[in-house]
Image (cartoon, helix red, strand yellow):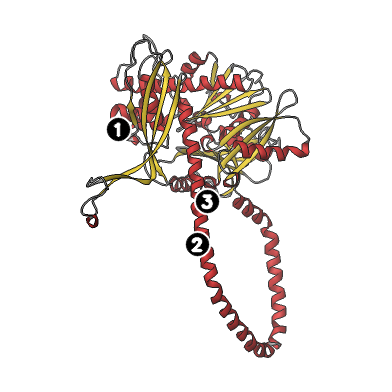
């Protein structure tokens, strides 16, 4: 990105509004981006401060991510002299379930009812356990396109609590891909053909298709961490050391008969990068084909790159060669002013990371094309309470004044109160007797509540099964399918019982293997066409991709891969996937 293309402000051409500042925070998988804007009288915004900071969290560790979020926000506020206040937040697209559905032409008063029904049908969790919102998007031939966005209530609640603990007040929660979409729409006026935004993050890559007034997004579980993990395996390093090596040595290796880099380390790292980029390119192609086939979209003619992983050298060259389209880095400051005290070098270095916070800030000064808000009900209630706080404070002062006036009056009635006190005490003793009689029903209610909690746990586990199966199916390459998915429970060996004469079973065995209640492994079997999968490498690649999912551990492995007999059209395989967290039954 050329620093000269950043729009800067001059005090003779832009007049600042004397209004509150706008604070925006993008919470990514491995880092935070915070920016402070002020609205301008011209109707736009001006960037006055920004901060980008990694969370410093190893994805393989058991640390509480929200603890890192709290400490990182506090450090950013202190280091960059940003005052706490209301904040607009965007969350990673990987954390949010999004779906685009078409509605037939209906009356305006029935749209909300139909959308609620579609949400119940499409969201893969009980609707009461999620926070969701929708946006109507112009369709074709009279149809309505609807974007549904939903996130688990417990996830967004924990996230907002972490932000509040750091000293900020959540005012709006957007989805990162949609904030990025709003920023692009504001800054680019020449998007006549289909444009694809590729936001390459740490854990995932978000794809946003823009075409006319339409939008479609998809999240791919391949990002910068996949490169780091490849380097970890190649050089047997810790995650932190592999991340440092990636930042220092990584670039996309040239394919074909090109001369390798002079250093052996750089050569290995570049090939690791190309391996992941090749996998990412395959997923992007699948998404483009899905967009064209299922959403009646066009082939992208222009690609805008953004995100921390996108700056790996030759990423743009690689994607231009593979996707046969013009590739450039997204500039969110083409129509957004930048304060004079921010150098061109600094904003040029960081601009590709700030698209989401620009899109968030625009929500405060403009009506944006997509306006999603996933604020949990508790935070919404507190926000409304804060707006009423001045009125309540005035009412409290009035109440205190009236109370003082009446205090004198009640002082004269003290003696009458003493006479009534004895009657009240008698009434209290009667109520205490009733309270003791109610204690037993209260205990019964508590027991029923505990049983209800157990039922809720079963419902949550059902949601996990949907997640796991969706993620596994998403990773299957073309020409490969599953024939069976068998959960397996934990097993132990029961020792002989002395009371039965040392026999553990009627058959005379001195020990017996039994199954416990928890499911800790999943056995999958499948087949693949040999013309699509000519050798065993796709099976091993599938195993590697499954290990990188958050559901499974690195001990997941292939347990069945027999050689293919002559004149056989399918290849058989089987894998034992070890769950990161057992599923309770």
Q: Residue 52 location, x and y as percent? A: 48, 38
Q: Residue 211 location, x and y as percent? A: 65, 22
Is residue 565 something one can see in this rendering? yes
The label on residue 447 is 2
Mark 3: give few (<14), some (14-19) or many (20+) Cα within 10 Å.
some
Marks 3 & 2, CB-CB < 8 Å contact:
no
Residue at horizontal 33 percent and vertical 16 percent from the top = 261
Considering depth in this image, is 459 or 249 the residue closer to the camera?
Answer: 459
The label on residue 374 is none
In space, the residues marked 1 and 3 are separated at their CA atoms by 35 Å
The label on residue 237 is 1
Residue at horizontal 51 percent and vertical 63 percent from the top = 446
For marks 1 and 3, the one nearer the N-term is 3
Q: Residue 486 location, x and y as percent? A: 41, 34
In space, the residues marked 3 and 2 are separated at their CA atoms by 30 Å
Q: Secondary structure at mark 1?
A: loop
């Amino acid at each position: 990105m050329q620093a000269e293309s950043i729009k800067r402000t001059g005090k003779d051409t832009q007049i600042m509004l004397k209004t509150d500042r706008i604070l925006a925070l993008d919470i990514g998988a491995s880092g935070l981006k915070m920016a402070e804007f002020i609205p301008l009288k011209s109707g736009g915004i001006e960037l006055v401060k920004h901060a980008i900071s990694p969370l410093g969290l190893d994805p393989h560790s058991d640390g509480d991510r929200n603890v890192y979020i709290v400490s990182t926000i506090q450090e950013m506020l202190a280091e960059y002299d940003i005052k706490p206040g209301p904040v607009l937040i965007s969350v990673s697209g990987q954390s949010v379930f999004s779906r685009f559905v078409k509605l037939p032409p209906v009356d305006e008063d029935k749209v909300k009812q139909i959308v609620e029904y579609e949400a119940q049908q499409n969201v893969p969790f009980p609707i009461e356990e999620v926070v969701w919102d929708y946006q109507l998007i112009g369709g074709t031939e009279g149809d309505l396109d609807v974007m549904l966005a939903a996130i688990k209530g417990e996830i967004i609640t924990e996230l907002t609590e972490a932000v509040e603990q750091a000293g900020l007040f959540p005012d709006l929660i957007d989805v990162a891909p949609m904030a990025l979409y709003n920023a692009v729409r504001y800054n680019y006026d020449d998007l006549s053909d289909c444009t694809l935004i590729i936001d390459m993050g740490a854990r995932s890559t978000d794809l946003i298709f823009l075409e006319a007034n339409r939008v479609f997004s998809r999240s791919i579980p391949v990002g910068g961490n996949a490169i780091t993990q490849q380097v970890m395996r190649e050089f047997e390093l810790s995650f932190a050391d592999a991340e440092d090596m990636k930042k220092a040595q990584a670039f996309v290796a040239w394919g074909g008969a090109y001369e390798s880099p002079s250093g052996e380390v750089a050569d290995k790292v570049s090939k690791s990068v190309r391996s992941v980029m090749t996998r990412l390119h395959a997923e992007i192609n699948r998404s483009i084909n899905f967009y064209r086939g299922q959403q009646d979209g066009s082939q992208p003619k222009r690609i805008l790159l953004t995100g921390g992983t996108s700056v790996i050298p030759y990423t743009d060259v690689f994607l231009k060669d593979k996707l046969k389209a013009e590739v450039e880095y997204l500039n969110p400051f083409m129509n957004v002013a930048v304060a004079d005290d921010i150098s061109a070098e600094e904003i040029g270095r960081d601009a590709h990371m700030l698209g989401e916070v620009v899109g968030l800030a625009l929500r405060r000064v403009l009506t944006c094309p997509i306006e999603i808000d996933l604020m949990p009900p508790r935070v919404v209630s507190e926000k409304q309470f804060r707006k009423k706080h001045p009125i309540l404070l005035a009412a409290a002062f009035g109440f205190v004044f009236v109370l003082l006036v009446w205090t004198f009056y009640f002082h004269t009635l003290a003696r009458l109160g003493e006479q009534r006190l004895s009657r009240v005490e008698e009434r209290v003793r009667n109520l205490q007797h009733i309270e003791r009689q109610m204690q037993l029903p209260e205990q019964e209610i508590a027991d029923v509540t505990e049983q209800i909690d157990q039922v809720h746990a079963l419902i949550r586990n059902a949601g996990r099964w949907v997640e796991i199966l969706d993620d596994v199916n998403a990773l299957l390459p073309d020409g490969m399918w599953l024939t069976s998915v068998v959960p397996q429970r934990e097993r132990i060996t029961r020792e002989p019982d002395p009371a039965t004469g040392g026999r553990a079973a009627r058959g005379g065995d001195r020990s017996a293997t039994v199954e416990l209640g928890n499911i800790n492994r999943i056995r999958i079997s499948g087949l693949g066409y040999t013309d699509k999968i000519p050798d065993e490498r796709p099976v091993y690649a599938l195993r590697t991709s499954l290990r990188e999912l958050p559901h499974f551990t690195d001990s997941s492995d292939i347990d069945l891969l027999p050689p293919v007999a002559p004149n056989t059209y399918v290849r058989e395989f089987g894998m034992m996937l070890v769950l990161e967290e057992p599923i309770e039954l």
